[in-house]
Amino acid sequence: MTTKSQAKNQAWLAAHPEIKSLRIAASDLNGLPRGKRIPASQASKAFGGDLRMPLSTLNVDIWGEDIEESPLLFDSGDADGSVIPTERGLVPMTWFATPSALLPLWMFNDRGQPFSGDPRHALKAVLDRFAEQGLTPVVATELEFHLLDGKASEPTPPISPLTGQTVTSRDVLSINGLDAFDEFFTDLYDACEAMGLPADAAISESGLGQFEINLLHTDDAMKAADDTWLFKLAVRGVARKHGFAASFMAKPYADEAGNGMHTHFSVLDESGANIFDDGTAQGSDRLRHAVGGCLKAMRASTLVFAPHFNSYRRMAPNSHAPTAVSWGYENRTAAVRIPGGNPKSRRIEHRVSGGDANPYLMLAVVLGAALVGMDDAIEPPAPVSGNTYDADLPRLPMKWSDAVDLFEGDPMIARIFHENLIRNYVMCKRQEITGFINQPRLFEFTTYMETV
C-alpha cells in the first residue's frame, strides 16, 4: 500500500464528512464481497493495510461455509492474511439511507506475497504475462439481469411502477419497457457515475423484467473486472432501494431467457496498434490464434463460465446461450463471435459466461486462454456459419460435476491459474454440489437470487 494511495483515501473521506461507516471487502471465489464494516473514524487502519482476515475467507462456499478438508483451515491453523486496499480506492454506496462507502481490497500473505486463492490476483497474474510481451488487452463487458418482485419468495416478475401491475410482457428492445422503470435506471446511472463505473446503453431484454447494460471498453482489464464486480453490487443495492430484487443468476425462470455476461476484447501492442487488425474482415493471424486458444480451453473453462447449480439451466439449445465449442463471424449462435465493422476495431466477443460468473476469474480464463493461443499459434477449426445448435460440434459439459472434473485436470487451465486456486475452486464446487443434493427447486432460487 503506497503512501500516495493512503493519502488519496484520507482526502476522499475528509471531503465526505457525512460518511460514518465503511464497508471493506474483497471478492471471494464466487464473486461475493467478503469483509467487514468499520466506523469511518477507524479508516486509517484499513488505508494503511493494517487489517487482517483469515485467508480462508475468500475460499468459502456459496453459503459462506468453510470448505471441509481445505488446507487453508486446520492444517495451517486458519492463518490470517493482510487485506490491502486496491488501487481503486473508496467508492460511494449511494443506495443506503445512511451514507456509506466501499473500500475494495485484495489479500496478501504475511510475506507480502499475493494470496493465490484471491480471484483478483489470478487476473493480475494473467495481465502480467501480457505486459511481459508488451501487450495490453482492451476489454468491455455486457451484463444481463432480471428485476424481480422484492417481496416474493419465488421467482416473480416485478410490479411496474408505471401501471402498478405485475410485468407480463417480454419487451425486447422496448423503450416503454425501460421507461416503466425510469426512476430505477436514473438512480442506477447516478450511482454508477458516483462510483466511476462506465455504464453505457441500457436495453430491455427478451425475458420478463430482464435488462442489459453495457460497460464501456477500457485498456485496463483489471479496471474492467473491478467495474463489473462493483456494477453488480450497485444494481442489487439500487434495486432494493426501489423495492425490487435484482438478480444476475443464470436462469431465474425455468421457461424464460437467462442472464449472460459477454465480454469483448482486443489487444494492443506497444505502439497502440490493435494486433487483431490486418485491414480485412477476417482479422490477423493473432486473432485467429487467440480464438484457437479460447476454443481449446473452452470445455475445461466451463466451470468458470457456469460456476453454479443454476448455471446449467441456461445452457440449453436455441436459448441464445452457447452449448458448443464454436466460433464464427457475425454469428450470435457461436460461443466466440467476431463482430464486423471497422477493421481497426476488430475484436473477439466471448459469449459463454453467465451473469453469475466471477468477473475476475472469467476475464482471467478468457484472456489467459487467448494468450496461450497466441503463444502456441493454435489454429482453430473453420468458422461456423448458420445455427451452431444444429451443427456437429464438440459440446460444452452440461453437468456441473463434469465441468468440475474437466477444470481440475486440464493442462490449459494449469497454464492460466495457480495450482492452489484450482485446488480450492474444485473443493469449493464439490462441496456445493453435495449441498444441493435432494434440495427443492426453491432452495436454488433463495441461494442464488441476490448473491451471484
Image: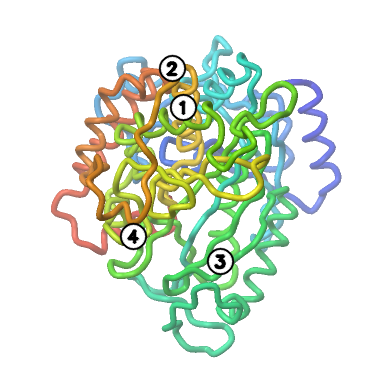
Any mark on residue 203, and which?
none
The secondary structure type at the circle numbered 2 is helix
Residue at the (52%, 45%) spot, across then down: 263
- First reached walking from the N terminus: tag 3 or tag 4: 3
Q: Residue at x 35, y 34 (%)?
A: 381
Q: Nearer the viewer, residue 93 or 31?
A: 31
Q: Disc 3 to disc 1, how far (Cα)?
A: 41 Å
Q: Earlier in the sequence, mark 2 or mark 4?
A: 2
Tell me the mark number nearer the camera, choosing from 2 and 4.
2
- Residue highlighted by disc 2: 376
Residue at which label 1 appears: 289
Amino acid at the residue labelled 4? Thr
**437 above or below 184?**
above
Do the CB atoms of the residues marked 1 and 2 lie less than 8 Å apart?
yes
Would residue 230 appear left or right of 354 to someone viewing this image? right
Quadrant location of residue 291?
top left
Which residue is nearer to you in this view: 106 or 407? 407
Instruction: Locate residue 25, reporting x and y percent.
Output: 56, 38
